[in-house]
Image (cartoon, helix red, strand yellow):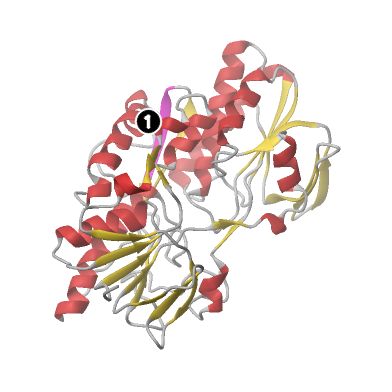
Amino acid sequence: MAQPEVLIVGGGNAGISLAARLLRDGFSGVTVVAPQPLHRYKPLLNYVGGGEATMADLERPMADVVPDGCTWIRDAVAAVDPDASTVRTRLGRTLRYSTLVLCPGLEEDWTATPGLQEAYADGWAASTYVPGSTPQVWPRLRSLRRGSVVFTVPPEPASCGPTALKPLFLACDHWRRAGVLADLEVRLLLPEATPTGLPQADDVLERALADYGVEVLRQSRIERVDADLHSLTVGSSTGARVLDDVAFAHAVPHYRAPSWIAGSGLADPATGLVDTDTETLRSRRHGSIWAIGDAAGVTPRPSGGALRKQVAVLSANLRAARDGGALQRYDGYTVVPITVGRHTLTLTEVDRDGRPSPSVPFVDPTKPRRATWWFDRYALPQVYWRRILRGRV
């Protein structure tokens, strides 16, 4: 095949929306390398886990979302040779590039939590972050009437980790309305001291957690799981604690960047993520390589909303690099939408320094509102399918 003008690794939100944006901006040859046959609008996974959506609401065939004029290679990357400007795939292809964009996402690191994968197989652990297990989450949560239930927020790197709180709050709202919340021991494991590290959001979320009576274990994570005994060994700065006889665990696995990123010499050794200039989104080591999304070493950690800004900046910078113009700067904008009840949602939008960066001026988005829940659940998915993936936002 002819060498593309831009070769994109990854067919998620970042890869497809960037491909569409580049084609609209006049790039003539854009190729996407992605193995998955389905494209998922991932934010709705949490609503599936809370009983407010189905998998059919968030899945489309990949062939239907790849933009016209873009070449899709259904394959996975095995290695990148920056010196030779080539990508080697698992099926043995060698792809040449002049510009390479890495947005492959993250992969589950099951080895980081021994026994967790067995608990998933046994059915008493699942999460909305693992699509194959997502349909199991709401039936299990809805059926609980007593006993111990555990929720976790994944440590970094993760894809918008704090939104793992959505199923917790939706479940607690359901249990309260069903009159069984007082009979359940609901625990939340946070990898850090607060849910998000953003004071505007944490104030709202801490009040909601206290209102539902959730026991919060801070700076904690699951160290190992006994799938037979339904027990979790939780490690924290104060020592280890065993949670016995867990009825259900919404336990999000740890994540890591694909190993070929480090194997190709593209990673920051401290994180394993692509060593990226957080403002220009260009590799710190190779001028022809760029990165966005979950596997890129940008700050703060990305979200779907952050990707919209990243795609706009990167598309402009790829044009500038090609034509000799000045590079634009990504300000670190990110957004954290979290439901705190069945039909209410708090929204936090900040820049890299944690300063508020609201999309709608003169409205406090952190105040839980039905309107923001409706937009997040119903309006934004339509914007995603009809505009974001077509490069129009």
Q: Main secondary structure of the magenta part?
A: strand
Q: Is residue 149 magenta?
A: no
Most foreground residue, 280 or 291: 291
Percent x, y for residue 38? 42, 45
Range of residues picked out in magenta: 343-348
Quadrant where the N terminus lies?
Answer: bottom left
Most foreground residue, 139 or 372: 139
Residue 239 relative to residue 336: left or right:
right
Q: Residue at x 17, y 67 (%)?
A: 27
For residue 328, what is the image quadrant? bottom left
Q: Is residue 345 magenta?
A: yes
For residue 168, what is the image quadrant? top right
Most foreground residue, 308 or 123: 123
For residue 129, what is the image quadrant? top right
| Any part of residue 204 in sight | no
Percent x, y for residue 143? 66, 19
Q: Residue at x 31, y 31 (%)?
A: 375
Residue identified by numbered label 1: 377
Residue 51 relative to residue 366: left or right:
right
At label 1, counting other C-alpha atoms closer than 10 Å, the crowd grade (few under 14, some 14-19, many 20 or more) is some
Percent x, y for residue 180? 67, 14
Percent x, y for residue 2? 26, 75
Q: Does residue 65 lie above or below 33 as drawn?
A: above
Q: Amino acid at mark 1?
A: Arg
Residue 55 relative to residue 316: left or right:
right
Q: Residue at x 43, y 63 (%)?
A: 299
Most foreground residue, 86 or 352: 86
* Residue situated furthest right in the rendering: 229
* Secondary structure of residue under mark 1: helix
| Any part of residue 202 in sight | yes
Residue 180 relative to residue 316: left or right:
right
